[in-house]
Amino acid sequence: MSCNQSEDYIQKLEDPEMFHGVMKKLSDVIVYDIFSPPVASRVYVYPSIAAFETVRFAHPEKYNTLVGQLNGLKNVPNPEEEHINFNLAAIHAFIVVGKQLIFSQDKIDTYQAALYNELRSAGLPKKTFIASKEFGEQVANHVLEWANTDLYNQTRTHSKYTIIPETKYWKPTPPDYMEGIEPHWKEIRTMVLDSANQFVPKPPVEFDLEKGSIFYNQLMEVYTIGVNLTEEETAIAKFWDCNPFVSHHIGHAMFATKKITPGGHWILITAIASRKANDTFTEAINAYTHVSVGLFDAFISCWDEKWRSILVRPETLINQNFDEKWVPLLQTPPFPEYTSGHSVISRASAIVLTNIYGDNFDFLDTSELEFGLPSREFKSFKHASEEAAISRLYGGIHYRMAIDEGVTQGEKVGDFVVNHMKTLK
């Protein structure tokens, strides 16, 4: 084997595309396995943390550990073997953790085998391969032990939501009338937030269907916009739909369309930003880790409010009181209305990304191309988050108050994550 051949693996492992690729593969499996938005955020965050806690050892002068910064994370193993390639170890840690959080492990196995064969063919020494995998496995197992204490497993057996008959409370919506998703998500341990209810938004406006009331006006705004959508409003709503499971009914036949989750969309935006900024391998992992932590805590904060106010969706009230045939442009997701999850998690992600890449970071969002939708241009991350938020009004699934308060809630979560999670020394 020539000297150049023996060094090919080093170039490959220093290329951030190696990590972008494995993150994209995890996203593809999340879509395939149809995880709900909150659960998907968990599938992203733990592998990202495992990768960061592994790769930081390659740059001890630059990066801090997250031990002591993330709730409950303690004593990550230190490397003891001299032949470790920390980039490879980080990829392996990411894969090991990710596989434990999904269903279709065979898809990751196939990807992993091809990746490792490529590296071995490029000259990766066996001792480096073994040492790197062993250390990645150590960190992965440590992170998985920690993940198992976040109450996710316990909440799988908790009681389902019991429908409250009163009109103002959420009811399952057409076409499938699915039961409410994750009513106990507030019990999941946060990453950086002190608690699920650290940033409780102000309550929704008083429920009142009398003509002229604030609530009535907000309800009618959803309806009026819904029946008079412009081409641009329709495009915005569809671009940010991000519903992991949209069911279609044609006669007696039913089929589903799978898409990325809202969090998955922001993970893809992170990849776009990272590439534009020419991030190194470690800088890319650092960005994904910050965004995934922000997403995770934002979903917990949002779901805490959703299942506190348990507010009815516009579709239910419009069908019952004004137009029984009206259907929103987007399929109403199966959980309460207030606050808007898109608004909360998009703003939190935008704050985190702005902290990393700057305030006027324009980009072309190509995230939805593979789902048949054109790209959209944004002047900044906050610009994108504002469009994501208002898209829910155009889609007919949120009142304006849920959007406005959701943005405020997301801003608070994002600011807190930025101020209390310091990976750079």
Image (cartoon, helix red, strand yellow):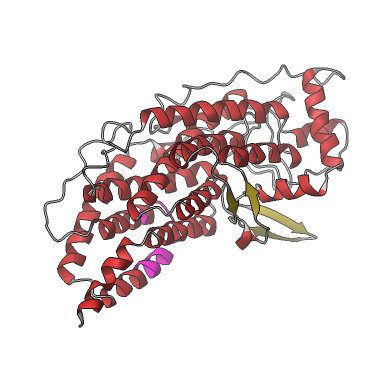
Q: Residue at x 27, y 51 (%)?
A: 55
Instruction: Tell me the quarter of the picture where residue 379 sits.
Output: top right
Q: Is residue 22 above or below residue 62?
A: below
Q: Nearer the viewer, residue 383 or 245?
A: 383
Q: Quadrant of the C terminus?
A: top left
Span colored in magenta: 99-112
Residue 209 visible here:
yes
Estimate the x, y position of residue 33 in percent, counting from the top left. 51, 57
Instruction: Tell me the quarter of the picture where residue 195 sits.
Output: top left
Q: Quadrant of the N terminus?
A: bottom left
Q: Residue at x 69, y 48 (%)?
A: 176
Q: Nearer the viewer, residue 55 or 276?
A: 276
Estimate the x, y position of residue 175 in percent, counting from the top left. 73, 48
Residue 103 visible here:
no
Q: How many marks?
A: 0
Q: Is residue 101 magenta?
A: yes
Q: Is residue 311 magenta?
A: no
Query: Quick check: 111 left or right of 131?
Result: right
